[in-house]
Image (cartoon, rainbow, N blue to C red):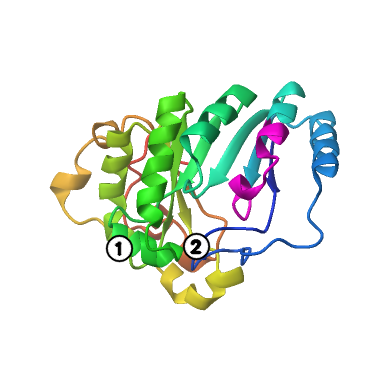
Amino acid sequence: MIVSWMTTNKCNLTCKHCYQDAGENKSAELTTSEALKLIDEIAKAGFKIMIFSGGEPMTRPDIVELVAHARERGLRPVFGTNGTLITHDLAFKLKEAGAMAMGISVDSIDPKRHNDFRGLPNAFELTLMGIENCKAAGLPFQIHTTIMDWNQNEIFDIMDWVKEIGAVNHQIFFLIPVGRGKEIEGASRCRIRRTSPQDYGKEPHTRYPGEAHMRSAVPSHCRPARHQDALQPRLPRGS
């Protein structure tokens, strides 16, 4: 079983689609001792994988301690992060503490478009540095991409890029119009369409030999295109 814990509302970015409208800390956030007790309860409940998310989990000064505690309790600690705060030192500390993988968000491989969407002029550059720091520490990482109208034509280029940088997985999400995402709800009305027989004639593993998944807990107008007779799945193990 998997549990995802929003470790904090604090975030260094102002992403346009953020379902939590993250930014500053909230007064009700757990202290370190409370967080350790929460992890104990999660382990007792039989969960196996614990996702540290946010906000941005790397903004918590106790994040390494929490990861180590989760691992000691038999959990597999993994992350949902924007990657911008994964320094060389932090990557090695997280690896040593027992972090199993990083899920790093990249919504465009065009730096300007990614930066505009994430609300920080050098977000893409910092995320790439975070990825390189994970690689240096031997910390596996996967890429998370939210598909919207403005980046849907990039998706297969992003998949190629994911392969090139050595990610173990590519998670594809569809926008959920809550939080700040409500302001761009129209961007969620997107479909991935077949563009040429030559492109889709390839076997999935010739484009990306790792794993790629689609997530679709969203309204019907945003369902994956395979549910709207637009194309046949080309991903190795979609879910």
**What's the magenta region?**
54-67
Residue at (61, 67) in percent of width and height: 21
Q: Earlier in the sequence, mark 1 or mark 2?
A: 1
Q: Which residue is mark 2?
A: 175
Give the number of the disc on residue 112: 1
Q: What's the distance in space between the residues labelled 1 and 2, CA to CA?
A: 20 Å
Residue 1 visible in the picture: no
In the picture, measured across the screen, residue 29 lies left or right of residue 107, that is right
Q: Is residue 203 visible?
A: yes
Q: What SS does tag 2 mark?
A: loop
**In the displayed structure image, the side of residue 103 where residue 19 appears, left or right:** right
**Which residue: 85% across, 40% down?**
33
**In the displayed image of the protein, which residue is found farthest to the front?**
89
Q: Give x and y (percent) for residue 111.
A: 30, 57
Q: Is residue 15 above or below residue 35?
A: below
Residue drawn at x 58%, y 40% is 79
Give, as a three-letter code, the residue at label 2: Leu
